[in-house]
Image (tube, grey):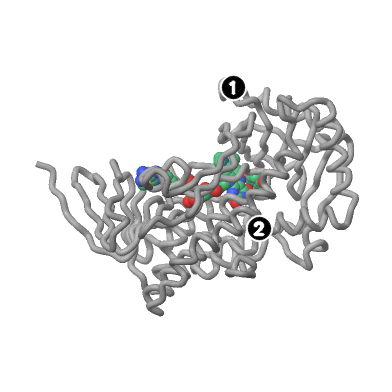
Amino acid sequence: MPQSHTIRTQVAIVGAGPAGLLLGQLLHRAGIDAVLIERQSADYVLGRIRAGVLEQVTMDLLDEAGVGQRMHAEGLVHSGFDMVCEGLRKRVDLAALTGGKTVMVYGQTEVTRDLMEARQSAGLPTYYEAQSVQIQDFDTAHPRVVFEHGGHTVGVECDFIAGCDGFHGVCRANVPQGAMQTFEKVYPFGWLGILSDTQPLHHELIYASTVRGFVLCSQRSHTRSRYYLQVPLTDTLDQWSDEAFWDELRLRLGPQQCASLVTGPSIEKSIAPLRSFVAEPMRFGRLFLAGDAAHIVPPTGAKGLNLAASDVKYLSQALRDFYLERSNAGVDHYSDRCLRRVWRAERFSWWFTTLMHRFPADATIDNKLKYAELDYVLHSEAGLRSLAENYVGLPLDFAQAGA
Ligand code: RFL
Ligand code: PHB
């Protein structure tokens, strides 16, 4: 007979990606008890190569969580990026356009590692490789999470469940039909990404719109590069040898931009579909959704991880209000506060994606119009300022009710 046991906590967090781990850390610092439940192993979570650009709001939150030291020591502060379009190359000077704001290039893997280590050294409970995770009774004051772990059935009794389990998780899927409205757009292409231990093409990021499709030249350090190519959704990894990738990158950017390109073997290669998605409201009873569980942006605007961080900021504040101030205000306003920032980031990510990619259904006039828009944005103070303001991240404060 498999054994079972029950644990009692204040907040059960489902999913130990950046959203779940960061929430766990902020709650711990506020003296609120939480248990983390993750379907995968810690190594698997660390093996996922995803985001690379952190906004100031995210950096501040990592500092608040007490895990910012390595980010400040090893992360790369970027005060601008380059845009390339049909032979035009222009630097977007983020700092000059936003009153000194910058972004940090520091991989999601590193953020996750720092949070995992902090959690482990504080001795906080995390169940990795949890199977058959179920959430129950979250429309009552006594929610539960039940799962299989190491041959045992574990029940977690709690006051709240935080659904930080990503787009394919169980939490959103268990909300009764009709209680949440979803909005979705799937783009007709994906991003083929490659990681390689080679010197980056440029000291800052390059976003390029080319006749053969979008290119992003990013990086993780001075010796590790991350490149992305827009590819048809039907493409598979076995069609893309490293050689084919570098050849296509050279074709898209042209010999002049690629003069100093250093190529080498890939250490990771993956294809990600692009999607805009929002579920609202982000709360049902005592279940809160945060991060990719509630919304997805196409990665062009580098907003996904940053939105997960701002959700977690609002959620940790709401839970602090509830436990430390005995106030329901934060809990009640959680969804509205998040969604206002989410929708603005959705709009920017959709706009930047549409502008920079070739769509299969685009007529020649669409391409001409996109070029004209890029030409305008890059040669207008107002256009550049709007791009820069959104890229560095909108402030958290405008999301206060009524503002
Ligand atoms: P995650 O990272 O998906 O973590 C969810 C966790 O939940 C677990 N899980 C479950 N656990 C228990 N029970 C279940 N039933 C479960 N089902 C799932 C999963 O195993 C996982 O560990 O969501 P989270 O924490 O909300 O974090 C969101 C970010 O990961 C995501 O938004 C970013 O990676 C998006 N993104 C970028 N964001 C940025 O801010 N800047 C960027 O530069 C950036 N670049 C990117 C990106 C995403 C990309 N891909 C691959 C989608 C570049 C790419 C290519
Ligand atoms: C990345 O380095 O993975 C990255 C950077 C900027 C983006 C998306 C992804 O817009």
Q: In which quadrant will I find the N terminus?
A: top left
Q: Residues within 10 Å of mark 2 (few under 14, many from 20)?
A: many
Q: Which of the numbered marks, if any, corresponds to residue 183?
A: none
Q: State whether label 2 is within 8 Å of ligand 1.
A: no
Question: Would residue 238 be found to the left or right of residue 2 on screen?
Answer: right
Q: Number of numbered discs present?
A: 2
Figure quarter occupied by ligand 2: top right
Question: Would residue 165 be found to the left or right of residue 211 on screen?
Answer: left
Quarter of the view holding residue 320: bottom left
* Secondary structure found at label 2: strand
* Secondary structure found at label 1: loop
Q: Nearer the viewer, residue 296 or 180?
A: 180
Q: In which quadrant will I find the C terminus?
A: bottom right
Q: Residue furthest top?
A: 239
**Inter-mark Cα distance, 1 to 2:** 33 Å
Q: How far from the left and from the top, in percent, is residue 382?
A: 85, 57
Among the two numbered marks 1 and 2 on one chain, the one whose residue lies closer to the N terminus: 2
Q: How far from the left and from the top, in percent, is residue 207?
A: 75, 42
Q: Which of the numbered marks, if any, corresponds to residue 104?
A: 2
| Residue in the picture at 37% in, 58% down | 285
The disc labelled 2 sits on which kind of residue?
A: Met
| Residue in the picture at 59% in, 54% down | 342
Position of residue 219 relative to residue 365, above or below, is below
Q: Can residue 251 be seen here? A: no
Q: How far from the left and from the top, in percent, is residue 174?
A: 36, 45
Which residue matches tag 1? 234
Q: Residues within 10 Å of mark 1 (few under 14, many from 20)?
A: few
Q: Nearer the viewer, residue 397 or 265?
A: 397
Q: How far from the left and from the top, in percent, is residue 201?
A: 75, 41
